C-alpha cells in the first residue's frame, strides 16, 4: 500500500518531467521534499523506499541523498521546526543568546523536540539573510533581527504566534 | 593506416623517462604498465574511477596543483613526476589525513601484513601523528555470515560501493551522511545478497571488510598459496588455496583476465569450510551383521574386486556400472571409464540430474562456442532454461557486462528466476518446449530455415505451435544482433524433453546465425564427455560397440554392482528416496570424501576419496579450457586421490593400461586421445538433423538447484548455509 498520496505523486511526476526520461533519479531531491512535507516534516525508511521504486533507483542511493542534506529529517520532528542560524554573521550578532533563550523557553536543547511535539529546535548553517542577522527559519518563513539584547520580546512573540497557529 | 597508428601514440615523460602510450589512458594505468609505483586506495583497475582518496597525487608540469593520477588522462608532451618534493609532500599530507581517524589496531587486525594502508603508510607517511583530537568511532555493520566489518577502520575509498553497483549488479552499500559523519554501509540492516559479495573483502584496502569465517585464524604471512581451480561451476575460476600447517585456511581469487578476471563467487570462496565436515577417513567394509567397519585399503580393495569378479562371472560385464560426480577431474573420469570398460561395462555416467538421454552421441558436449571474454561483445543474448546468475555466477557477470554495453537479453525461464541485468524480452513459463518451438517457428516463417528441414516439425506437424509476440521479439533480437548467442543452461539440460530442446536451440542458432552455447552443472561436465565417462562413447569419442545405460536407468534398474564416485546419492541424483535406495540394493562401492545417507545405509565398501584441495587434477571449463591444478594439502586420514584409487582398482582387477605413476601421465594419455592443442578443445561441429517430433511438449520445467545446494562440499559449508538462510528468511526454495 502506498504511503504517498496521489497529489504528492503528481507533484513528483511534474519534477520527473523536467529531466530526461532516462534520468528519472534527478528528481530525487524534490521527491524527498514533497513526501517529507506530506509526512509532517520527516522521512521514514518506507517512504524513501517508495521514492526509490518511483524513481527506479537503488534504495541505498535514496538513503545517501536523504542523509547527506541537512534539510531532510530522518527522525520525527515537532509541528514547528525552528532552524536557528549560528553561522558567522548571526554569531557576530549574538545568535548564542537566541539559542539560549529558545532553549530556555522551550525546555529542550538544540536538536531536540518538545514533549508536546510542538517544537523542534535545530541549528543550521547560513540562511542567506545576513543583513538581518540573527535569523531563524520556521517553515517557509524567516524571522529576523532576533537579538534579545536589542529586541527582548521578539522571540516570545514568535513563539506565541507559532503556538497560536496550533 | 600507419600514419593514423602514429597519431594514436601519445608521448609523455614520467620521472624523466620518455614513454609512448595510447591516448585515453589514465596516468596511473600507464605508470602501472611501466613499473612506476604510485600509491592508491580508491583506484582499482576493474572499477570506475572515483578519485576520492587523493593518494595518487602526482606533479604534472604546468599544472598549478598536484593531480590525481587515476583521473588524469595522458596528454601529448605531458611531464609527470611521482617522486618530486611537491608530489612527496602531497602524498605525505594525504596519508596523514587518512590516518587521522584510522585506529592503530594493526596488531589485532586481520588485514595486517596484506594491508594497503599499512604498506603505503610505511612508504609515504610520516612517523608520528600531530593529531590530538578524538578519533571517530563508527558502528559495525552486519553484512551476514560471510563478510565481517570493522567500520572504524574504513577510509571511505568506496571500492565496495562501486563493486556493488558495477560488478555485483545490486547496489546495497553506499555512503550515508556527510563530512565527519559519513559512513559506508547499507543504512538499513541487511545481509549482502550478491553471490559475489566476498570480493569486497579483497577490494577493501584496509581491515574494514574481512572474511568472517577466516577472522582471527591466521596471518597473511603464515600462509602458503597454491593455485587451483574452483570446483563448483563450469567457469573454472582460478583460485589460490591458502594453507597453514597442512590445513586449508582460506580461498582467494587468482587473477585470470580470460576466465574470472579478479573475482570469484562466494560459493568458490567459502566452500572450503565444508571440505572436512562428515569426512570418511579410512576404508570401510560392511560386515556380516550389516555394520560398516573400518579396515585397511588392501582388504577393502580385495572385497571390491572379489565381488565385482563374481558378479561379472555370473551376469557379465554389463551387470556393473558407475556413477560419477560432474565435478570429478578429467583423470578420474578417464580412469573410472577405463576401469568400467575394462570390466566389460559401458554403464558409466555423470549427468546426475538429466532425465532425457535419448540424443546420446548425436548431441555435442556441453560447451560454449564463444570464449567467456567474447560473451561481453555480444549484442543479443538468448538465455534458455538457465538460472545463469546462480548456476555460473561469473559467466553471468560477462552477460551482465554485455548488457551494460548495450546488449539485448531475452529469456525463457520459470517465473521465479530473476537476474541482476536488464532483460528486454522475458518469456516466463513452466514449459520450455512450446516457447522454444514458437521462436523457431517464427524464424522459419521468415525464410531462414534453409536446408534444415524443419517444416514438418514446426508447421506441418501434428502439434500446432503458437507464435506469441514475445517469440517474435526474441527472433528479432537474434536476427538483428550482429553478434548473437544462444545460451542453453542447466534447466534446459535437466528437462524431460532435453533432446528436443537441444535440437530446437540448435535450429534457432543456425537459423539466426547465432553461436550455440551450452553450460550445465558441475565443474567438469565437458571433461567428463571428453574423457569418455558417458555410456555412448569412450575417451576421445571413440564409439563403443554396445551403448551402456545412463544414470536414470541405473537408478530405476540398479546394476548388481555399482561404483558411486564422489556422488552424494540422495542429494545429487534426481529421484525420490525410494528410487535412490533401490540403487543400494546391489553391491555398492562408494568412493567418496563424505559419509552420506546412502553410503551409511547401503554401501558395501567405502573407499575414502581425497576432498577439496587434496588432490591434483584437471578440469575442462565450459569454454574447453584445460586447467590443471595440484593438491594444496594432504588428503585427510587415509583418503587417497581418486586417480590413485582407480589405478589400484584397475591393477587389482588385472586390467591392462593401469601402470600409471602420476596424474600427469594419466592426463597426457587423455589429451592424446582427445586431440587437445594448446590446452583448448576446439568447438565441435555436430552433425545435426531435425527431429521428427517435438517429444513431450507439455513437459514441465524442473526447479533450479539453489545457489548453495550444488554439491556435497557447498552443502556442508556452514557459513554458506547460514547466508542462504538469512537471504531467504529461513524459507527454502522461494
Image (spheres, coloured by chain):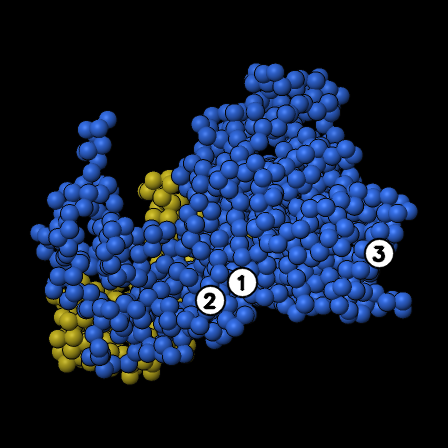
Q: Is residue B438 visible?
A: no
Mark 1 Cα within 10 Å, few/some/many (few <14, many 20+)? Answer: many
Residue B647 appears at what percent x and percent y? 69, 53
Q: What residue sits 15% from the left and 51% below the top?
A: B17
Q: Secondary structure at mark 1?
A: loop
Q: Colour of chain A?
A: yellow
Q: Nearer the viewer, mark 2 or mark 3?
A: 3
Q: CA distance from mark 1 to mark 3?
A: 34 Å
**In the rendered view, would you say B336 is above or below B250?**
above
Give left or right: position of A25 versus B369.
Answer: left
The disc at residue B306 is: 3
Q: Earlier in the sequence, mark 1 or mark 3?
A: 3
Residue B40 appears at what percent x and percent y? 28, 60
Mark 2 Cα within 10 Å, few/some/many (few <14, many 20+)? Answer: some
Residue A96 appears at what percent x and percent y? 20, 79
The disc at residue B658 is: none
CB atoms at circles 2 and 1 under 8 Å apart? yes
Whether labels 1 and 3 belong to a single chain: the reply is yes
**In the rendered view, would you say B426 is above or below A158?**
above
Q: Which residue is mark 2?
A: B224
Q: Secondary structure at mark 2?
A: strand
Give left or right: position of B672 versus A21.
Answer: right
Q: What residue sits 46% from the left and 57% below the top?
A: B253
Q: Earlier in the sequence, mark 2 or mark 1?
A: 2
Q: CA distance from mark 2 to mark 3?
A: 43 Å
Give left or right: position of B90 versus B466.
Answer: left
Q: Secondary structure at mark 3?
A: helix
Q: Colour of chain B?
A: blue
Q: Quadrant of residue A24?
A: top left
The disc at residue B632 is: 1
| Label 1 chain ID | B
Amino acid at each position: 500500500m502506498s504511503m504517498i498520496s496521489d497529489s504528492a505523486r503528481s507533484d513528483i511526476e511534474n519534477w520527473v518531467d523536467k529531466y530526461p526520461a532516462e534520468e528519472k533519479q534527478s528528481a530525487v531531491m524534490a521527491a524527498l521534499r514533497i513526501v517529507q512535507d506530506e509526512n509532517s516534516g520527516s522521512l521514514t525508511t518506507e517512504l524513501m523506499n517508495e521514492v526509490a521504486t518511483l524513481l527506479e533507483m537503488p534504495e541505498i542511493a535514496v538513503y545517501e541523498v536523504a542523509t547527506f542534506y541537512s534539510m531532510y529529517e530522518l527522525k520525527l520532528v515537532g509541528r514547528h521546526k525552528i532552524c536557528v542560524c549560528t553561522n558567522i554573521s548571526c554569531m557576530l550578532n549574538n545568535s548564542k543568546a537566541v539559542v539560549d533563550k529558545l532553549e530556555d523557553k522551550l525546555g529542550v536543547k538544540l536538536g531536540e523536540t518538545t514533549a508536546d511535539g510542538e517544537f523542534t529546535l535545530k541549528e543550521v548553517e547560513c540562511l542567506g539573510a545576513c543583513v538581518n542577522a540573527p535569523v531563524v527559519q520556521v517553515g517557509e518563513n524567516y524571522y529576523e533581527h532576533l537579538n534579545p539584547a536589542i529586541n527582548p520580546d521578539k522571540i516570545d512573540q514568535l513563539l506565541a504566534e507559532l503556538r497560536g497557529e496550533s | 593506416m600507419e600514419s593514423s597508428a602514429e597519431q594514436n601514440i601519445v608521448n609523455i615523460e614520467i620521472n624523466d623517462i620518455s614513454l609512448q602510450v595510447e591516448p585515453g589512458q589514465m596516468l596511473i594505468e600507464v605508470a602501472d604498465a611501466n613499473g612506476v609505483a604510485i600509491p592508491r586506495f580508491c583506484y582499482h583497475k576493474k572499477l570506475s574511477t572515483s578519485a576520492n582518496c587523493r593518494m595518487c597525487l602526482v606533479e604534472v608540469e604546468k599544472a598549478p596543483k598536484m593531480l590525481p593520477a587515476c583521473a588524469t588522462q595522458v596528454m601529448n608532451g605531458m611531464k609527470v613526476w611521482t617522486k618530486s618534493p611537491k608530489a612527496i609532500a602531497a602524498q605525505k599530507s594525504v596519508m596523514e589525513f587518512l590516518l587521522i581517524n584510522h585506529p592503530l589496531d594493526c596488531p589485532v587486525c586481520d588485514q595486517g601484513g596484506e594491508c594497503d594502508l599499512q604498506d603505503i603508510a610505511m612508504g609515504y607517511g610520516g612517523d608520528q601523528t600531530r593529531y590530538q583530537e578524538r578519533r571517530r568511532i563508527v558502528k559495525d555493520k552486519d553484512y551476514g555470515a560471510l563478510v565481517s566489518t570493522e567500520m572504524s577502520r574504513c577510509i571511505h575509498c568506496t571500492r565496495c560501493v562501486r563493486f556493488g553497483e558495477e560488478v555485483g549488479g545490486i547496489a546495497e552499500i553506499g555512503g550515508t551522511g556527510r563530512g565527519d559523519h559519513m559512513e559506508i554501509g547499507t543504512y538499513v540492516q541487511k545481509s549482502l545478497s550478491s553471490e559475489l559479495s566476498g570480493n569486497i573483502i579483497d577490494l577493501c584496502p584496509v581491515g574494514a571488510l574481512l572474511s568472517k569465517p577466516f577472522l582471527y585464524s591466521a596471518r597473511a604471512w603464515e600462509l602458503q598459496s597454491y593455485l587451483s581451480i574452483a570446483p563448483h561451476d563450469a567457469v573454472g575460476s582460478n583460485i589460490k588455496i591458502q594453507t597453514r600447517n597442512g590445513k586449508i585456511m582460506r580461498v582467494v581469487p587468482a587473477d585470470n583476465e580470460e576466465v574470472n578476471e579478479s573475482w570469484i563467487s562466494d560459493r568458490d570462496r567459502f566452500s572450503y569450510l565444508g571440505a572436512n565436515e562428515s569426512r570418511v577417513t579410512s576404508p570401510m567394509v560392511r560386515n556380516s551383521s550389516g555394520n560398516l567397519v573400518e579396515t585397511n585399503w588392501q582388504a577393502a580393495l580385495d572385497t571390491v574386486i572379489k565381488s565385482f569378479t563374481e558378479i561379472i562371472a555370473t551376469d557379465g560385464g554389463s551387470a556393473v556400472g558407475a556413477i560419477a560426480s560432474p565435478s570429478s577431474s578429467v583423470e578420474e573420469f578417464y580412469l573410472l571409464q577405463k576401469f568400467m570398460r575394462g570390466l566389460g561395462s559401458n554403464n558409466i555416467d555423470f549427468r546426475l540430474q538429466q532425465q532425457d538421454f535419448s540424443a546420446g552421441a548425436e548431441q555435442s558436449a556441453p560447451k560454449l562456442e564463444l570464449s567467456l571474454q567474447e560473451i561481453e561483445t555480444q549484442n543479443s543474448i538468448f538465455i534458455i532454461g538457465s538460472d545463469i546468475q546462480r548456476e555460473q555466477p561469473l559467466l553471468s557477470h560477462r552477460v551482465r557486462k554485455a548488457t551494460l554495453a548495450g546488449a539485448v537479453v531475452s529469456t525463457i525461464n520459470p517465473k521465479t528466476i530473476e537476474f541482476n541485468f536488464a532483460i528486454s524480452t522475458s518469456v516466463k513459463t513452466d514449459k520450455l518446449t512450446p516457447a522454444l518451438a514458437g521462436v523457431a517457428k517464427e524464424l522459419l516463417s521468415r525464410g531462414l530455415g534453409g536446408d534444415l528441414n524443419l517444416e514438418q516439425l514446426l508447421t506441418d506437424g501434428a502439434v500446432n505451435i503458437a507464435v506469441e509476440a514475445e517469440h517474435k521479439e526474441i527472433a528479432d533480437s537474434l536476427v538483428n544482433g550482429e553478434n548473437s548467442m544462444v545460451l542453453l543452461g542447466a534447466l534446459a539440460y535437466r528437462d524431460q524433453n532435453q533432446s528436443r530442446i537441444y535440437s530446437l536451440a540448435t535450429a534457432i542458432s543456425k537459423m539466426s546465425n547465432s553461436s550455440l552455447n551450452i553450460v550445465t552443472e558441475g565443474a567438469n561436465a565437458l571433461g567428463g564427455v571428453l574423457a569418455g565417462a558417458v555410456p555412448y562413447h569412450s575417451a576421445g569419442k571413440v564409439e563403443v560397440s554396445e551403448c551402456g545405460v545412463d544414470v536414470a536407468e541405473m537408478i530405476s534398474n540398479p546394476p548388481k554392482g555399482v561404483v558411486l564416485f564422489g556422488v552424494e546419492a540422495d542429494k545429487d541424483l534426481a529421484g525420490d528416496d525410494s528410487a535412490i535406495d533401490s540403487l543400494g540394493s546391489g553391491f555398492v562401492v562408494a568412493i567418496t570424501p563424505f559419509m552420506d545417507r546412502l553410503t551409511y545405509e547401503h554401501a558395501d565398501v567405502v573407499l575414502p576419496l581425497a576432498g577439496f584441495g587434496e588432490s591434483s587434477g584437471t578440469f575442462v571449463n565450459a569454454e574447453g579450457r584445460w586447467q590443471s591444478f595440484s593438491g594444496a594439502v594432504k588428503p585427510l586420514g587415509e583418503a587417497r586421490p581418486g586417480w590413485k584409487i582407480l589405478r589400484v582398482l584397475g591393477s587389482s582387477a588385472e586390467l591392462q593400461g593401469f601402470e600409471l605413476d602420476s596424474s600427469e601421465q594419466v592426463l597426457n594419455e587423455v589429451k592424446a586421445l582427445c586431440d587437445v592443442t594448446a590446452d583448448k578443445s576446439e568447438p565441435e561441429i555436430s552433425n545435426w538433423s531435425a527431429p521428427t517430433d517435438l517429444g513431450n511438449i507439455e513437459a514441465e520445467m524442473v526447479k533450479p538447484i539453489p545457489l548453495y545446494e550444488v554439491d556435497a562440499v557447498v552443502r556442508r559449508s556452514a557459513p554458506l548455509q547460514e547466508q542462504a538462510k538469512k537471504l531467504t528468511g529461513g524459507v527454502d526454495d522461494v
